[in-house]
Amino acid sequence: MTAVRDGRVSVDGRVETDPARLVVPERTRLAVDGRPAAEAAWRAILFHKPRGVVTTRTDPEGRTTVYDVLGDAGKGLIAVGRLDLATSGLLLLTTDTQLANWIADPANAVVRLYAVTVRGRVAETDMADLTGRVTLRKLSARESHLLVELREGRNRQVRRMFETIGHEVTALKRLALGGLDLGHLEPGQHRTLTTREIVQAFPGAPVRAVK
């Protein structure tokens, strides 16, 4: 859907920006970035998004985007979900829109694991009010460090969770998505993923490159 909204998809030669439009693939000429959809090479990369970078193709405020950081490596790829400006960590990008939609669908309950730092000491009694699985790692009067595991990716979900119990998130990093993790990638680095890695990381997901 992101590729459609970004104006990268054409239907019968005309740019289509409505992701809700229904088409019959067998009777329609679909192209992504000017290339027939059926011929577009399958690619997926795992990217360590730095903090202070936006997950959009262009930014009206002139901020650095993930595509600026990736350069040629990001051409033709769409981001699977978004990490906000102040969030760092694992971002999956791919040419496979069907895979991206499957991962984003809450019905598939894909795990997202975050390392979170918040102001103040989080009381264990407050954790019952938080969504998902939350593990305390380190506590002090000044700040608390936690791991948060969620199975959907709503906008600013982690930040809103802690706001409800009176704690401001000061650092947020996504460590894992499904069966993928950051490994030793430094901020701004990426690596290419194989179809085998994707199939193992997201059991049951449709992967266009696998016949």
Image: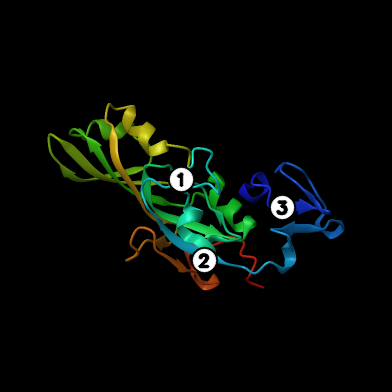
User: In the displayed structure, does residue 176 sit left or right of residue 75?
Assistant: left
Which comes sooner in the sequence, label 3 or label 1? 3
Q: Are marks 2 and 3 in contact (CB under 8 Å)?
A: no
Of badges 2 and 1, nearer the viewer stands 1
Query: Horizontal and vertical percent for residue 57?
Result: 55, 49
How many labels were placed on the picture?
3
Q: CA distance from mark 2 to mark 1?
A: 24 Å
Badge 2 local density, few (<14 within 10 Å), some, or many (20+)?
A: some
Mark 2 to mark 3 CA distance (whole Å):
24 Å
Foreground residue among 203 and 77 = 77
The quarter holding residue 44 reads bottom right
Dot 1: within a 10 Å radius of its alpha carbon, few (fewer than 14), some, or many (20 or more) residues?
many
Judge whether residue 202 can be spotted in this image.
Answer: no
Mark 2 or 3, closer to the camera = 3
Asked if labels 1 and 2 touch by Cβ distance under 8 angstroms, the answer is no
From the image, tell me which residue sits under label 2. 198
Residue picked out by circle 3: 9
Could you tell me which residue is drawn at 37 percent across and 38 percent down? Answer: 158
Looking at the image, the residue that sits furthest to the right is 27
Extreme-left residue of the structure: 141
Q: Write the residue at 37% across / 52% down.
A: 50
The residue shown at (84%, 60%) is: 26
Name the residue beneath numbered marker 1: 54
**Residue closest to the eye, 133 or 114:** 114
Position of the C terminus, as image quadrant, is bottom right
Q: What amino acid does circle 2 point to?
A: Ile
